[in-house]
Amino acid sequence: MNVTYLRFELLRLFRNRRFFVFSLVMPLGLYLAIAGPNRDERVDIGSGEIRFRLFYMVSMAGYGAMVAARGAGARVAMERSVGWNRQLRLTPLSPAMYFTAKVLTGYAMACASIALIYAAGISFGVRIHGEHWAQTTAFILIAIIPFAALGLLAGHLMTADSIGPAIGGAGAFFGILGGIWFPLPQDGFMHEFGQSLPSYWIAQASHTAYGGEAWPLRGWLVVAVWTAVIAALTVKIYQRDTARA
Amino acid sequence: MRTHDVDQGIALRSLVKSFPSAKGRVHAVRGVDLTIGKGETVALLGPNGAGKSTTIDMLLGLTEPDAGEVAVFGGTPQRAIAAGAIGAMLQSGGVLKDLTVRELVAMMGSLYPNPLPLQEVLELAGISDIADRMTAKLSGGQTQRVRFAVALVSNPDLLVLDEPTVAMDVEARREFWATMRRFSAAGKTVVFATHYLEEADAYADRIVLMARGRIVADGPSTEIKARVGSRTIRATLPGAAIDDLAALPGVGSAEAHGDTVILSCTDSDAAIRALLEKHPDARDIEITGAGLEQAFLALTTGDDVEEDVPA
């Protein structure tokens, strides 16, 4: 573990104010705008009812974390645009260390985003047990692994110019169809399809808020399969990605 | 213990590389054989599209050759890289943003087993005075120097520079090469690509001339310079005897087109003096350097002319 290298990667992340602020504003803004007026509504999450302020807090914490995790990929695209991926390839930096550093910057952003949304949720009156906070957070952090991989895949495939819209589009796709932005219908095709997306299981982290089970086996499988497939593709693309820009 | 043997130098054997492109396959490198000994400073000289950068990419293991082999210090480029034995300044790259110059060099240094002390690298590359500046705020020439520092920081045994002085003015260029000299004096092997004959001549022990994906000449700088550095004298001189002109000192060959005579010179200074002494009535005199492009064409005439190769 190269601590110096990691430290500079994180320093670069926090120095880039525009990127930093932009990644945090969108989910927080959505939460304040949508959960604010509806904070006391009740939502049926299948196995019971919870308050909208809690449901949407977990949704937006998950959405923000998902966006943040993918954001590491946008940074890869910027680095590739100045040929830095080729420069790094000429150092003893291992692919494992390279990806660890990138994923950690994504997670640093994700944690910042989650903390902000939680603060907003608490200000709207969300009160849950300490262990439920911990479980919900843990499930969100696990569920965004495939998105961190997806971001890195895009970062190694796309240019700095094209990755912005692609990430925005993918965010909307996974956000809407996975039931993060708005609750999905309780049955039918949309419900079934949504369950095969890893983003669906981010929203399901809210089940733990009142002591329920966040994911059945299917949830774990969906997240594991998406992660495995995208990570394998990413490694393949990374190995080939040494050409001159 | 080191996993590589610096004394074995570098060996490129029968390298071939082509790329797909919109206009069919581009044969960037068509059979390059090159052996470089420890401590040599070698210039890869050639016009754009000669295959220099592709050859360098294969030397560094960034591009897999279609055929042929690359050995760096007795092993694969990847092994030499893992040992921190190669430093490189690639063509037309930038630097990472959101760091100061000092931080960037320290970050890259942290990746190597035996980096040079930070301060020493900054001084060697001549960037101590801009060490605390953000990398995004540098001029083109300063950026090149920072990239040079990144190439030096591992204290590599092999330094590879692909057109390192592209963004520099004349003064910066001179300083850059002076720095390079200081570094290479310590028994380092240096390979650099350039399309400036003057640069190759002034800073390399040996010039490897490339054109259309092949090595067309390889030898000590002075020898190569004599081959490609010839000048041509053109003048209007009605009725002159071609054989007499060809016999003038410094003239290699002569031809006439109407009233215009064209003398290809081995020593244009001697030739012009002799010409004016014998033929004071010569007018419209022009002396031109052959230019690399022309010299390459001359050296490669008779070659199969296939598709052009992009840079």
Image (cartoon, coloured by chain):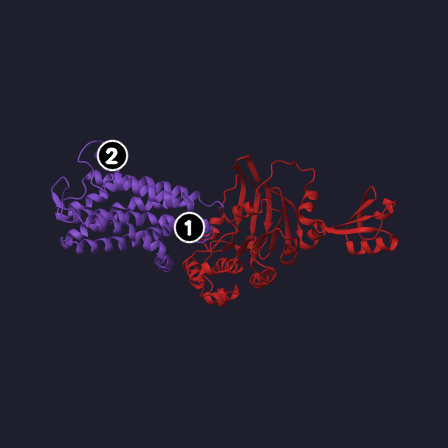
Chain colours: A purple, B red
Residue sitting nearer the eye, A115 or A219: A115
Q: Residues within 10 Å of mark 1 (few under 14, many from 20)?
A: many
Q: Residue furthest top?
A: A188
Q: Which residue is mark 2?
A: A193
Q: Is residue A137 visible?
A: yes
- Residue B247, percent across and down? 85, 49
Left or right: A190 in relation to A239: left
- The residue type indicated by label 1 comes to Met
Q: Position of residue A136 (x, y in %)?
A: 19, 49
Residue A37: image x %, image y %? 18, 49
Quadrant in which the N terminus of chain A appears: bottom left
* Residue that badge 1 annotates: A78
Q: Chain of mark 2?
A: A
Give the residue displayed 14% in from the left and 39% down from the top.
A46
Q: Amino acid at mark 2?
A: Phe
Residue B293 location (% of width, % of height): 66, 46
